[in-house]
Image (cartoon, rainbow, N blue to C red):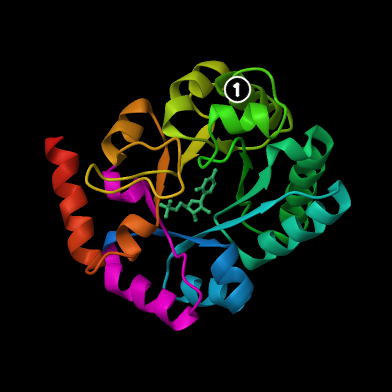
Amino acid sequence: MPWREKLIIALDVSEPDYALELVDKFGEQIEIYKVGLELFTSAGPKIVEKIHKKKKKVFLDLKLHDIPATVVKAAVAATRLGVYMFNVHASGGLDMMKMCKDAVVELCLKENLQKPRILGVTVLTSMSQDVLKAELGIQHSLNTHVRHLSALALKAGLDGVVASGHEVSKIKNHCGKGFIIVTPGIRPSWHPPDDQHRTMTPKQALREGADYIVMGRAIINSDNPLKTLELISLEMLTV
Ligand code: C5P
């Protein structure tokens, strides 16, 4: 699969018109767009329909984290929107993830809908080992924690996880090659990490075995997003 088919662009903007302008700008080059908290809370579910009308797939990145009954209802709504993927926090626990997956499977069978891929968010790429220990009180290593949450997501029947490039090979070894890994925190070599801690270049992350990589600011906040995409393509060939 060409690498651009594995690239998900994060539409982290609040203006729906601008988000759609970006989708038009990338045209045939990009297949999947991530709609996250900023765009979804400013534009509502209509933005998902509008992106679908442009024949693009949507990764709905709302990172659901609540009691099982509430997550189930949001998951059902996301499925009815026809998104390609959506995610829940794996730290919401086994019951929450399992009930979410069961409800989605049941709905899809009953209403003959396409089943979205459901991913578990492990540890945010903006978090470091120190923060995990000092602020969240998690004593074991970040790698162990990511592996643990990935195994829990697998046990719940989810399709994969969101994790940094640094954990990809360990998760694949533990959960199997078919377990999807979506990797944010991606930065071309020339770009600062911003608030992300566990970053990787696109080439490194794909080499590690990430199934999809997510890029937001490095592309959409650049002066010329199309040119930046070209520069990243060059880096894919050379670095
Ligand atoms: O701008 P940048 O490329 O850092 O954007 C990364 C995107 O991926 C953001 O939309 C962020 O919400 C999302 N994300 C993340 N870490 C996760 C899950 C999602 O950065 N673990």
Residue 210: image location, x then y, percent: 41, 34
Q: Amino acid at mark 1?
A: Arg
Q: Is residue 146 above or below residue 194?
A: above
Q: Nearest the camera: 123 or 114?
A: 123
Is 8 inside the magenta-drawn segment?
yes
Q: Categorize mark 1 by other alpha carbons within 10 Å: few (<14), some (14-19), many (20+).
A: many
Which residue is drawn at the image coordinates 45% and 38% (left, top)?
197
Residue 162: image location, x then y, percent: 54, 39
Give the main secondary structure, helix, strand or loop, of the magenta stretch.
Answer: helix
Q: Nearest the camera: 191 or 153?
A: 191
Which residue is drawn at the image coordinates 57% and 21% (left, top)?
175
Q: Residue furthest bottom?
A: 17
Where is residue 25, by image quadrant?
bottom left
Q: Residue furthest front?
A: 134
Q: Nearest the camera: 201 or 98?
A: 201
Q: Where does label 1 land, which residue?
A: 147
Residue 173: image location, x then y, percent: 50, 16
Count of numbered labels shown in the rendering: 1
Q: In which quadrant is the N terminus drawn?
A: top left
Which residue is drawn at the image coordinates 45% and 65% (left, top)?
11
Is 9 inside the magenta-drawn segment?
yes
Q: Is residue 191 found left or right of 173 in the rendered image?
A: left
Q: Which residues are magenta?
A: 1-28
Q: In which quadrant is the C terminus drawn?
A: top left
Residue 90: image location, x then y, percent: 69, 37
Q: Is residue 183 found left or right of 109 in the rendered image?
A: left
Which residue is drawn at the image coordinates 80% and 53% (left, top)?
72
Q: Is residue 60 found left or right of 194 in the rendered image?
A: right
Where is residue 41, by image quadrant?
bottom right
Give the secondary structure at mark 1. Answer: helix
